[in-house]
Image (spheres, rainbow, N blue to C red):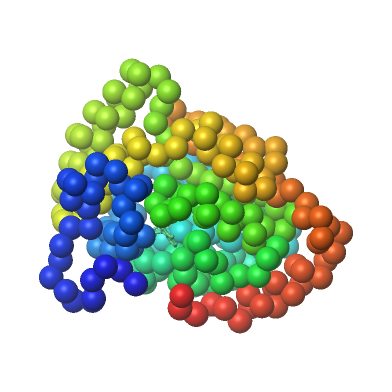
């Protein structure tokens, strides 16, 4: 995992050349993993300071949009240090189980996953190859993760695979505002406040806070995301934007699978299988 062995001399995950087309880099997954491992110690602090605390509000809204039903199994993909999972743990009605997946070991190591009202299981794995059975989750969320996938459609398809029919998917992600003035404001913010906070707090050398605005600028539009969710097998898709059009919550419902509709067996089998997974490496 990652591009370089542990303890190797640090080198930036993102340089100017790679940042021209961040989503087209053949080793994007390794770059992303290295980058998050590098910024893990200050990740949450930079988010809070650079967003003026708004990131917690966006996550709370995403959790509310997930519309958890009592006893649901919630899967949070790209869980990082666990902000979404902890928000779910305090949310009513309560899920029966929270599962977090992420491939960056340092992000998981910095997370606080124990002692919450709902048990949290964490799995280190690639979101594009989830070690979970088909139709095993009732709610699937991903906050600020899908932009980092090395194959966006494959990642959404994988979410649909593990979603049981009727499951809710909620994706929280940055988006480029449609309005030119707001686009300018976002660029200005990235170059000044975001870079300033990151330089002071994170002292990052991985290029993470250059990758962040660039990966947003070159990412899918909201319309394209909605089309991709439909292609993956989610219906009733909606998008709600916040933060002057710069943050989006996408929502959809897993359409029934013809060969599984009406069967509770797959869900029970999946729960049994995923019980054995926490702690397993990818
Ligand atoms: C911006 S952080 C978001 C963390 C958390 N969801 C939050 O809201 O703070 C993105 C996370 O996605 C993870 N990630 C990106 N691509 C991934 C992939 N293909 N498989 C697993 N995790 C991935 C990164 O390791 C990182 O922890």
Depth check: 200 or 135 in front? Answer: 135
Image location (x, y in percent) of residue 213: 29, 39
Please tell me whether residue 25 is drawn above or below residue 117 in the rendered image: above
Please tell me whether residue 56 is drawn above or below residue 5 in the rendered image: above
Residue at image point 31% right, 52% down: 25
Image location (x, y in percent) of residue 109: 36, 71
Please tell me whether residue 275 is drawn above or below residue 175 in the rendered image: below
Q: Quadrant of the N terminus?
A: bottom left
Residue 198 visible in the displayed image: no
Residue at image point 86% right, 59% down: 262
Quarter assignment of residue 104: bottom left
Residue 278 visible in the displayed image: yes
Residue at image point 44% right, 28% down: 245
The image quadrant in which ligand 1 is located: bottom left
Residue 56 relative to residue 215: left or right: right
The number of numbered badges drawn on the structure is: 0
């Amino acid at each position: 995992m990652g591009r370089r062995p542990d303890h190797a001399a640090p080198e930036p995950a993102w340089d100017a050349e790679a940042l021209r087309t961040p989503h087209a880099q053949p080793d994007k997954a390794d770059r992303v993993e290295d980058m998050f491992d590098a910024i893990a110690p200050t990740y949450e602090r930079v988010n809070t300071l650079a967003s003026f605390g708004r990131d917690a509000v966006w996550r709370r809204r995403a959790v509310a949009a997930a519309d958890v039903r009592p006893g649901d199994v919630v899967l949070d993909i790209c869980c990082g240090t666990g902000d979404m999972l902890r928000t779910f743990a305090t949310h009513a009605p309560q899920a029966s189980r929270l599962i977090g997946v992420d491939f960056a070991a340092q992000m998981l190591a910095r997370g606080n996953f124990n002692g919450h009202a709902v048990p949290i299981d964490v799995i280190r794995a690639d979101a594009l190859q989830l070690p979970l059975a088909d139709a095993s989750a009732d709610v699937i969320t991903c906050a600020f993760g899908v932009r980092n996938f090395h194959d966006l459609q494959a990642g959404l398809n994988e979410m649909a695979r593990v979603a049981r029919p009727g499951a809710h998917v909620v994706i929280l992600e940055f988006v480029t505002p449609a309005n030119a003035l707001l686009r300018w404001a976002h660029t200005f913010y990235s170059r000044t406040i975001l870079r300033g906070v990151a330089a002071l707090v994170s002292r990052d050398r991985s290029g993470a806070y250059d990758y962040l605005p660039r990966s947003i600028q070159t990412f899918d539009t909201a319309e394209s995301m909605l089309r991709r969710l439909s292609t993956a097998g989610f219906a009733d898709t909606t998008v709600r934007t916040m933060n002057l059009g710069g943050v989006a919550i996408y929502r959809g419902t897993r359409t029934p699978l013809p060969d599984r509709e009406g069967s509770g067996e797959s869900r029970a089998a999946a729960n049994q299988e995923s019980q054995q997974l926490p702690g397993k490496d990818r």
